[in-house]
Amino acid sequence: MTVEVAIQQALNGISFGALLFILAAGLSLIFGMMDVINLAHGAFYMLGAYIALAAVQRTGNFWLALVLAPLLVGALGLIIEPLLLRRLRGRHLDQVLLTIGISLVIVDLVGLVAGREIRSIPFPAGLDRSVPIIGGDYPVYRLFVIAFGILLAALFAFIHRRSRLGALIRAGVDDAPMLAALGVDIDRVFATTFAAGAALAAIAGVIAAPVFGVFPGMDVDALIYSLIVVVVGGLGTLSGAIAGGALVGPADTFGKVLFPQFALALIFAIVAFVLLLRPTGLLGRVRIAR
Amino acid sequence: MNGTPLLTTHDLRREFGGVKALDGVSLSVAAGERRAIIGPNGAGKTTLFNILTGELDPTSGSVALAGEDVTRRAPHELARRGVARMYQRNELFEPLAAAENVLLAVGAARGPYRPFTSPQPDDRAAARELLARVGIAERADVAARSLSHGERRQLELALALAQRPRLLLLDEPTAGMSPAETARITSLIAALDRSLTVVIVEHDMDVVFRLADRISVLHEGRVLADGTPAEVRGDRTVNEVYLGKVVA
Amino acid sequence: MRRGALIAGAAVAALALVTFPVWTSEWESSRYATTVLRDMLVLAILALSLDLLVGSAGLPSLGHAAFFGAGAYAAAVTMARLGSDELLVGLGAAIVASALLSLVIGLFAVRAAGIFFLMLTLAFAQMVFAVAFQATELTGGSNGLPGVRRPRLLGLDFNAPDALFELVATTFVVVVLLLWRIRTSAYGLALVGVRENERRMRALGYDATRLKLSAFVLAGAIAGVAGALSGWSLRFVSTNDVGIGRSIEAFVSVLIGGTATLLGPAIGAVVVLYVERVLPSSIPFAETVLGLLFIAFVVAARQGIVGVARAAYARARPAPARAS
């Protein structure tokens, strides 16, 4: 591998890592607050991408799609949590099973409405060029993805550390029942958290669409990858999602380039290995979960 | 009592992130002895029991059972070596009937890898007998979660006895019991055969003084005093720290 | 119910099931019902094996299809490579492959519990999927293995649809009997003990990890048998047999039918396949129906069909409080 190719692949890896972070952040948030692995995460991602597809087809405006998709999917999450998940409060395993059912419904309906062909969204105007980087031209959009990821991470870090919402989230991650006992409207917190997680998945779907396309089965891919990132980096923490993305993105990219036959299996081997040694992931918090 | 100690611990220490739960506990319990361990909350009694049953490893120190070092053995290995525990907070099989609970305990000795054999009639009979012994024979077919608190404690004791242990660890057996229930359980324990060694953690001093041959007083992870009930009652430090002002 | 009557009834039902193609041949010449029922039974076997983990041992596995697929591939590939049509060769290969795989995966998986166990099994199953996807010379990759030969046993040839159905149905009956025996055995009770209170089981002297592992391997082996049957039934093995969709299918069957019951998973499999196979001829949104059904059961009828039936029966004739 030449230096030029290596740099290109490195950028690809970082860009993929940034995308993975955006994707995994929502899953990590929901798990961190509610102890629920949202297995409908991939479905929300898919829904976001398909909404963006429809929006771009109708208006040609990518940025509108980027705002609309998380809004709509977030609203859906805001309905689902109180309607269904809340009834299973305290039954974490059953909540996880519930999200499987939700996933089945969403994925099927999306396929029915939008058809089963592979579609894609064009790069938004302005980001469809390539710029010269050491080693050749590199698509601007992928650099945008990196920037977006960093921006989002910075935003989260700020909220986390500085705002009341952040304090609330930190407390909720540590001890949700105590928070409830202190008079915080835990129902509202959970509903909002779930909606936010769903919205984040949708954003990831929109951002990824120009690069990876929009097609049936994308929900499974997204779910698996977000699980990998969250598990490796650390369950339930922001830094975990960043760490996971930073690790898995380049590993996956270089793996596919260097030994495509075993890249996937290698990634999963890493997952299993990490889960065994540190069930809460590299940077995860210790949980007394059952 | 024979002189050969059944259980010895040597300088047991256990830290939890800087907190010293056990700070050098050395005990020696003779075979057949009834040893009570008392001390205020947080003294390290439960930590000690968790180490003795293998659920926790000590940070340093050792545990020996009839001379054999069992310091870092897994719980099931200790159980196989004759250690049984009555938990402070019941650890029962909630949806199963009382008889099935005890059946599981009885069947452990046989080894469970017989996927095509029903539980042996001998085991079933032994289970019923144990239930009768602790006094809940007529509740044999009731689910554990439907039993009263006192009955659950009795079942908890039955599980421990079912293992035919040589060392019985009782973790606050009378916790939450009415005086009548307390009296019954205390009689049960007092009537246990001397082939069984009993170590009991208790807060109820009446029970302690009724049952114990020797008492060890734990305080802040260390053994404060160790002796016969009379010796402990008269020990000044114990009085100051734990018993309050008791006439020496 | 009187025990003798129960046994007799079960025997009659089993016989009726196995001979289904015979007594329906008049009004079922297209063999559609036979084919659907056959596939239901295959899924039922898979679901029953999964419930050994979920229901008996309390291990929620979302990666059970890995063993199903392993069995399917092993049977098809071994028979093709060896040029053998022998039933026992195929079954043997399926059982060995799935048992070995479940042993390897189980060694890692059973150290986790609850949600972590779920994620581990999911991760490992995806690994198996990835391998099956990549190893194209062996598994046909995403195209799969068409042209799987049906087996024969001594004089019996299972090529004909009726004969194959009878093979599947007989295997189903055998598996049900096997699992019934296990559930009522000391081992079965021990598994329930591990499910209900693992800490206490260890304190009693049981090696809980080994118990869980043994259940895992046993369940995996039975799933492998189901996989072999699937390959023979469809004459086709593909990565679908190993994918997350199949794992979810099995789990949904277990839950809808009723976990920790003898026939619940089988009933669930019938419902699931009915929705997936029969319903689409009437409506295009069968998976949505399945998803909604699943949600409904998780939220409102967690004990599944069998559980609901039992509760209704208990309400109909009041009895003194007994253990469940």
Image (cartoon, coloured by chain):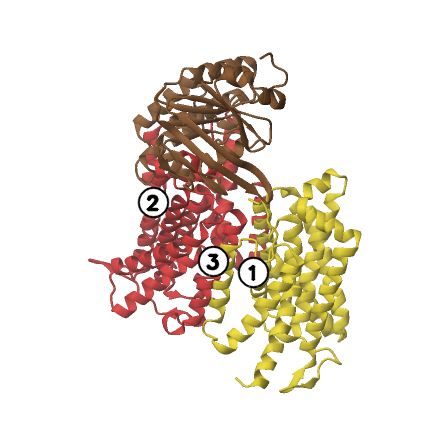
Residues packed near mark 3 inside 10 Å, few (<14), some (14 to 19) or many (20 plus):
many
A170 and C276: which is toward the camera: A170
| SS for callout 3 | helix
Q: Residues within 10 Å of mark 1 (few under 14, many from 20)?
A: many
**N-terminal label among 2 and 3:** 2
Is the residue C20 above or below the residue A116 in the image?
Answer: above
Task: Name the element at disc 2.
Answer: helix
Protein chain holding label 2: C
Write the residue at 77% across / 52% down. A165
Q: Is residue A107 left or right of residue C107?
A: right
Q: Where in the figure is residue C14, as x and y percent of width and height?
A: 33, 43
Residue B214: percent from left, percent from top: 46, 20
Relative horizontal placement of residue A81, taking residue B84 as reference (left or right): right
**In which quadrant of the rendered view does residue A104 lie?**
bottom right
The numbered mark at residue C246 is 3
Q: Disc number at residue B21?
A: none
For the residue marked with disc 1, what is the amino acid? Val
Q: Which mark is residue C16?
A: 2
Please determine whether, in this image, residue C159 is positioned above or below residue C212: below
Question: Which mark lies nearer to you, 2 or 3?
Answer: 3
Q: Are marks 2 and 3 in contact (CB under 8 Å)?
A: no
Position of residue B225 measured from the top left corner of the image (x, y, whole percent) = 52, 24
Residue identified by numbered label 1: A232
Tint of chain C: red
Mark 3 chain: C
Q: Position of residue A210 (x, y in %)?
A: 66, 75
Residue B164 seen by the camera: no
Report if residue A249 is visible in the image.
yes
Q: CA distance from mark 2 to mark 3?
A: 28 Å
- The numbered mark 1 sits on a residue in which chain? A
The chain coloured brown is B
Q: Colour of chain A?
A: yellow
